[in-house]
Amino acid sequence: MSASAEDILAASEAGARGGNVVFCVGSVLRGDDAAGPLLAKRLEDDPVAGWLAVDGGQTPENDLGYLRRLAPQRLLLVDAAAMGLEPGAVRRLRAEDVAVQSLITTHTLPITYLLGELEQMCGEVTFLGIQPGGTEFFDPVHPRVLAAVESVYAALAEGGNFEQYPFVTL
């Protein structure tokens, strides 16, 4: 007898439970807002041991139940964030940083709500924002944003130390 889809999903979740998750957020249709999904794709193509990628797309709140079941010890949230910096700049953000109106993103719910939910279910949450150049529909992804995605991927591959990225100063 073959396993049901539910059995396969449960086994997959059990293997990842309590581990490390990269929660990638953004829209592949909006230029540099694709930074998160591009990182998810990179991790899908070349996985990093100890990290599970979850592509939250444009509606990351839809994945909260799945993340709650995984109960990760560490969660890295990656999203484009308008911080007034050069395109491709990567900064760590705190909840109080994203409460500032200039950091509102293109998603359906405020990122502060998402962060609050993640902090309740995870041992450690790190939010990395990548400064977009353009987020209009069908804009190309800026080369510096692509380089930033590779930089975050390298940080994951080298053990997940994100202290190389300074906190944003507003």
Image (spheres, rainbow, N blue to C red):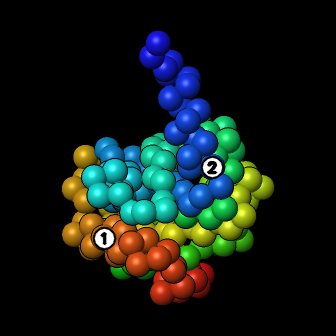
Could you tell me residue 76's position as x and y percent? 55, 64
Please state, as top left, top right, bottom left or bottom right, where the C terminus lies in the image: bottom right
Closer to the chain start, of discs 2 and 1, is 2
- Determine contact: label 2, label 1, CB under 8 Å: no
Q: Is residue 61 above or below residue 4?
A: below
Residue at mark 1 = 150
Q: Residue at x 67, y 41 (%)?
A: 69
Residue placed furthest toward the top: 1
Q: Residue at x 35, y 57 (%)?
A: 47
Q: Residues within 10 Å of mark 2 (few under 14, many from 20)?
A: some
Q: Residue at x 45, y 46 (%)?
A: 55
Amino acid type at circle 2 is Arg
Where, by quadrant of the figure, is residue 96 drawn?
A: bottom right
Q: Secondary structure at mark 1?
A: helix
Q: Mark on residue 42?
A: none
Q: CA distance from mark 2 to mark 1?
A: 26 Å
Q: Mark on residue 17?
A: 2
Position of 100 with respect to 161 (left or right) is right
Could you tell me residue 65's position as x and y percent? 66, 38
Q: Is residue 47 above or below residue 54?
A: below
Residue 115 visible to an observer of this rendering: no
Q: Residue at x 27, y 67 (%)?
A: 146
Where, by quadrant of the figure, is residue 98 drawn?
A: bottom right
Residue placed furthest toward the right: 120
Could you tell me residue 82's position as x and y percent? 48, 67
Q: Is residue 101 above or below residue 121?
A: below
Could you tell me residue 85's position as x and y percent? 42, 79
